[in-house]
């Protein structure tokens, strides 16, 4: 039976690279995004136009998708603002998109037959991070990964990845001086590529042993060794 994978934000960046891998592997792919302008795989995937900050409508939206075998919570937002200059509406939007929505999707997709879930977290959730609210949401997502792995007791395998900065549109929100400082901390001397994160997620939803459960895989080229 063809596997059905649901990818939030699968229309660009890491999500786009993952969409390509899943299509090449023969998955049925559904992508949720606010718009699909310029999306190169629009004819090959089920494009679900939806604003994931609207948590109240997520259940109705998911009900139209049928059985979901794999969920990848990839969509997220970062503003790179000082903690004392954060507009409340941005705090609320970040909490919804980066944390509340993934948790809601996990809950609903578990009822829709999902077997594997991967959450796209961040190194920001593991370290003290200049964007305080971003770090808080990603730390919460890492904790949710552990919690749901226990709650589902092996019936659903739940893991996360924690990339350091990646060459996507989000990178442009980080001030230049922070980018330059980060590059001094990594073994490779460069940022991660979207394909590298996507390949790790793909492995987790296809070939990774089920004993890897409740785990967060670091992808940071030595920027945070533990």
Image (spheres, rainbow, N blue to C red):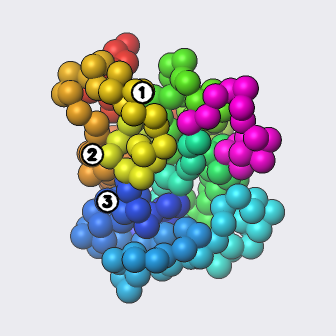
Residue situated in front as seen by the camera: 96 or 60: 96
Residue at x-position 27% and y-position 51%:
195
Task: Give the structural element (helix, strand or loop) at label 2.
Answer: loop
- The quadrant of the rendering that contains the N terminus is bottom left
| Region rendered in magenta | 80-96
**Label 2: how many Cα within 10 Å (few below 14, some 14–19, many 20+):** some
Q: Is residue 86 magenta?
A: yes
Residue 159: give x, y in percent of width and height: 47, 39
- Label 3, label 1: how far apart the Cα atoms are: 25 Å
Q: Which residue is mark 2?
A: 193
| Residue 220 spot, x, y in % from top left | 32, 29
- Which residue is at 71% across, 49% downward? 93
> From the viewer's perspective, is residue 43 above or below residue 27?
below
Nearer to us in this view, 112 or 178: 178
Question: Is there CB contact under 8 Å for labels 3 and 2?
Answer: no
Name the residue beneath numbered marker 1: 178
* The C terminus - image quarter: top left
Q: Which is more N-terminal, label 1 or label 2?
A: 1
Residue in the picture at 54% in, 18% down: 128
For residue 144, what is the image quadrant? top right
Q: Residues within 10 Å of mark 1 (few under 14, many from 20)?
A: few
Quadrant in which residue 182 is drawn: top left
Give yes or no for contact between labels 3 and 1 (Cβ–Cβ under 8 Å).
Answer: no
Mark-to-mark CA distance, 3 and 2: 10 Å
Prevailing secondary structure of the magenta residues: helix
N-terminal label among 3 and 1: 3
Residue bearing the label numbered 3 = 17
Most foreground residue, 131 or 226:
131
Give the mark nearer the N terminus: 3 vs 2: 3
Instruction: Mark yes or no: residue 208 visible.
Output: no
Compared with 97, 85 (above or below) is: above
């Amino acid at each position: 039976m063809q596997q059905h994978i649901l990818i939030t934000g699968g229309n660009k960046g890491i999500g786009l690279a993952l969409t390509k891998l899943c299509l090449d592997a023969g998955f049925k792919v559904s992508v949720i995004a606010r718009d699909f302008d310029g999306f190169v795989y629009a004819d090959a995937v089920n494009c679900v136009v939806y604003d994931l900050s609207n948590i109240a409508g997520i259940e109705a939206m998911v009900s139209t998708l049928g059985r979901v075998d794999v969920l990848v919570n990839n969509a997220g937002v970062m503003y790179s603002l000082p903690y004392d200059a954060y507009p409340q509406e941005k705090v609320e939007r970040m909490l919804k998109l980066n944390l509340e929505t993934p948790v809601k999707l996990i809950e609903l997709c578990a009822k829709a037959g999902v077997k594997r879930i991967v959450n796209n977290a961040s190194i920001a959730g593991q370290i003290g991070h200049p964007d305080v609210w971003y770090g808080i949401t990603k730390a919460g997502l890492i904790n949710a990964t552990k919690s749901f792995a226990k709650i589902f007791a092996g019936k659903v395998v739940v893991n996360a990845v924690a990339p350091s900065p990646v060459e996507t549109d989000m990178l442009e929100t980080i001030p230049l001086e922070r980018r330059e400082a980060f590059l001094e901390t990594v073994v490779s001397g460069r940022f991660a590529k979207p394909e590298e994160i996507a390949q790790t997620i793909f492995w987790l939803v296809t070939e990774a042993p089920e004993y890897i459960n409740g785990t967060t895989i670091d992808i940071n080229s030595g920027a945070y060794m533990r």
